Amino acid sequence: MIPAGTAVGRSVVRPDLAAKLSGAAVYGADLPVAGVLHVKLLRSVVAHARIAAVDPAAALEVPGVVAVVTAADLVDLDATWGHYVRDRPIFADGVVRFAGEIVAAVAAETEEAAAAAVTTIEVEYDELPALLDVAAAAAPGAARVHDRAPRPGFACPPGTELGMDNAFYHHGLQHERVAEVDEAGAVVVQHEYIFPAVYQYAMEPHVVVASWEPDGISVHSSCQHPFLVRQELATVFGLPLERVRVRVPFVGGGFGSKSYTKMEPVAVAVARAVGRPVRLVNRVEDAMVTTRRHGMRCRMRTAVRPDGRFVSRQAWIWMDTGAYADNGPTVTMVAGMAAVGPYRWDRVDIDAACVYTHLPPSGSYRGFGAAHLQWVGESQVDEVAALLGIDRLELRLRNLLDRGETLIPGQRPLDADLAGDLREVAKRLDWGGALPAWRGRGISVGVSPAGVSARSAARVELRPDGRVMVLVGSQEIGQGARTVHAQIAAEVLGLGMERVVVLPTDTDHTPYDRSTGASRSTTVAGLAVQRASERLRTALLAAAAEHGGVPVDELTLRDGRISTGKRSWDIAELAAAGPIGADGDASELTGAGPALFWEVCVAGAEVSVDPETGLVEVPRVVTVADVGRAVNPSLVERQDEGCTLQVIGNAFFEEMRFSEDGVLLNDSLLDYRVPTLTDVPAEMICVIVENGDGPGPFGAKGCGEGVFGGLTAALVSAVTDAGVPVRELPMSPDRVWRWIQQTTSDTAPG
Amino acid sequence: MKPRPFTYLAPTSVDEALAALAEHSFDAKVLAGGQSLAPLLNFRMASPEYLIDINDVAGLDRVRRVDGGWHIPALVRQRTVERSPELRAAFPLLPAALEQVAHPQIRNRGTVCGSLAHADPAAELPTVMTALDATMRVASVRGEREVPAEEFFQFHFTTSLEDDELLVGVTVDDLPPATSTGFAEFAPRHGDFALAAVAGVVTRASDGAVGAVRLVASGVAARPQRLTAAEKVLLGQRPTPDVVGAAERAARGEVDPTGDIHASADYRRHLVGVLARRVLTTIAEEGDHA
């Protein structure tokens, strides 16, 4: 632990707590908008078809309906979007590629009229065969989901190769420390693994209020990346950036489901067609076909010397990105990196492929990549340990990379003490202690690239009322970004929290921030806030020196007051004539590649398995928040706890189930079970590790996602330790029971 | 979504309610606790033209003693039954099952008869009432009739109620002496619909052998299913672990569930065996110590 500052290092109460608890917080669906029309979408009921006809006549007869908008209304635009691959039509144009694709929109005076009208639009589909399995879609000779060469989107990194096959993007990692083949006698483990498609389930589905005005587009959106949404809309609608304005109200959770662009293009397209502001509110069943987590198949091979030294790892990974790329290539890249594991290998050979299918599009979800692959690699480490008779913890400690060693050539060297983290977990799990039958312990270690981009800027202003306004484009999506940014400014400026206000984002006024994701809000945007606050502090002291006629080095700034030995002023006096502001950014972090820091994914778990029903209970989890410096320890713990619950859903019961025709079967919260309080483990231990080794403010680095990789793997490890080998998630009771049957029959005598 | 528009009727007597049902028949739905009906309306899986709210009907909200048993009228809430000292003593099976039904907030509103009339094959109460051999009291303007539970539940969400009939109450006869009951279900999360459940009522003869048994499973068929093969194994035998094991196998063998997105058919079949054994083991231990 590092001693707390005046604000940093303290579990201060979130400034937005009262608004959220009292209902005063205004979300997108609550925004009062004069003359707003309500939008309902007609979605394809089939996975793959040519659209023979769309007949909106009946819908236009419904009282209150103002317009029905389809692809035919956008022929003057290049109406496709996608930040990585520009592959997605705003409205299905002649063909639908997944069940749920948007075919038409109704704009009406009331939500009821829009809802009634949308069901009367007649669409004639000529059905086509659908590719629903990622392996089949990636197979040679498979029909193509897209017949045109992929067009790079505005955020596609220069030089990225996008191919014509359904497996249109590959992330390969090949490196050799020792150029040889695996020696004879090496222990080799090789299996295939399956990871399910799941849904992020932010409590608030996507909401967009859009208007098309003479001077440009105005959008209020529940989004995580408003500046990238602005760029996307500017690109699609052919406007300069400054004519697109994106504002973000309170957001009811994101988890990646609101990253990049989602519902904004269709909302703007409708607003453009009707010439009035429109509001589009997704329902859960809409949100589930808007974005989801990639399902995955993987084959992995691990070879280890008989003395326990790791030799080589190979993996072939297929990520099901659905009909449109969304953020699939990035997810695929991180999945490939996660397949390596933070170990000292002689040879690594990974091929991760991003594959189109005729399922709903997949994008970002908390901890992506690590959630998909860490459990796969770590279960092979466990298997090797069992084969060699070496303790699982010991085997890991022997092969773990040390701080400063290269994990992936060309990327930031390892910047954490993973062995120390792992020992912390083991201690709290009573590692090595005896357990009754059908109980097991698991432990796991991994890292995931975080930060992604140094492009965050902030402006901090002292206003005449004595308050400090922080303008920073990181979104408050429940994680506490605004609290943390206020703490950073308060600490630097010597102010009480009540005098610091972090403003909501308006792209017309807020400095640029690339995105709220990759655990970058504290580390990257927070650094921008810190630098801006430092400059403001310098400016205030300089102004005070002039104001009071004393040298700067005789002044102190505490509790909002500037003092010399005898006199003091409230800083408000300095701003009496107008705000004093300063800018800062995080550009000092540039040049590190996508991993501005490695987010630590270390966790442990204890489980008990009911061998008769296959039900797994989780009496204890231990998570490590290796955060460098905990700006707000309570928020750090809440991050780990929230993520723990999402992991339990993903690991044990969440799974989007599609019919043989590719239609989502469990598109309601009745049938798609998300975790509730009853799923909370009896004991949740969050170990905060503060080594001051992060690149962010006060030595901080991001948190909140590492648990997805670490705990998923630890749970698999624990269930395996209890006697049930796992090669597929979720570990639902039905599956666990079947695996037990298989294991029993495999080992039955005679 | 919100329900399609409907006409709301609020009769204050059984006769008024029956008259309304007679008039609107197939176009009407009866609202008691609304814990199943309201979601159906909101999802528009049910779109009645008339909603007959019986909550103002007098005389249907108190459990009463009847000759040789207890009568639970149509407006008695599940939570009331669960917490009634008399009913807990008379039928421990009821609280054992009711504690598994959804959550207290839902049981505070949901009625016993509402759940029976709704006849969800995954619900606890139809299974338990079948095991208790309860009798449904059914009324219409044409008169009253009594229907045994086993004849009442017919198919998914389908009972032998005619369109103009109201389930006015359910009567449960006192259990014979030396009778033990048990209930077990498996739901991945408490409060969810069970993947499978088993309710058992076993009466022991003076020598400790099983004299009468009703073993009923839910989640494996379109209505509560009596496990007659397992019952046959038990009849006349002392419920030793071997006998219980044989009953488990019989139960597994006689059900033919279908798989769905929540569980495979094989798994449900296996669960019915496990749950039958758990119920019978509890009953056997209780009977042996009685």
Image (cartoon, grey):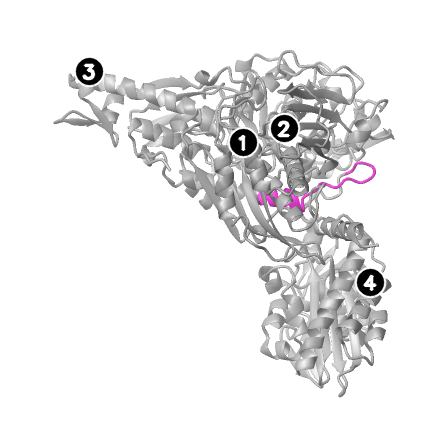
* Labels 3 and 1: the sequence-earlier one: 1
Along the line of sight, which residue is nearer the eye, B241 or B98?
A: B241
> What's the amino acid at mark 2?
Val
**Quick one: label 3, few (<14), some, or many (20+) residues within 10 Å?**
few
Asked whether the beta carbons under mark 1 and mark 2 sit within 8 Å of each other, the answer is no
- Judging from the image, mark 4 belongs to the subunit labelled B
Discs 3, 1 touching: Cβ within 8 Å: no
Structural crowding at the residue carrying mark 2, measured as other residues with C-alpha within 10 Å and reported as few (<14), some (14–19) or many (≥20): many
In the visual, does A373 lie left or right of B29?
left
Query: Mark 2 = which residue?
Result: A340
Residue at 55%, 44% in the rendered image: A604
Residue position for label 3: A546
Of all chains, the one bearing label 3 is A
Q: In this view, does A606 lie above or below A213?
A: below
Dot 1: chain letter: A
| Label 1, residues with CA under 10 Å away: few <14, some 14-19, many ≥20 | few
Work out whether residue A324 can be spotted.
no
Of mark 3 and mark 2, the one earlier in the sequence is 2
Residue A652 in magenta stretch: yes
Where does label 1 land, which residue? A33
Pointer 2 with pointer 4, Cβ within 8 A: no
Q: In this view, does A575 lie to the left or right of B222?
A: left
- Tell me the mark number nearer the camera, choosing from 2 and 4: 2
Residues behind callouts 3 and 4 on a single chain:
no
**Disc 1 with disc 2 on a shared chain:** yes
Q: Which segment did they paint magenta?
A: A645-663
* Callout in the foreground (1, 4): 4
Please name the residue shown 59% across and 75% down the image: B84
Quadrant (top left/top right/bottom left/bottom right) for the C terminus of chain A? bottom right
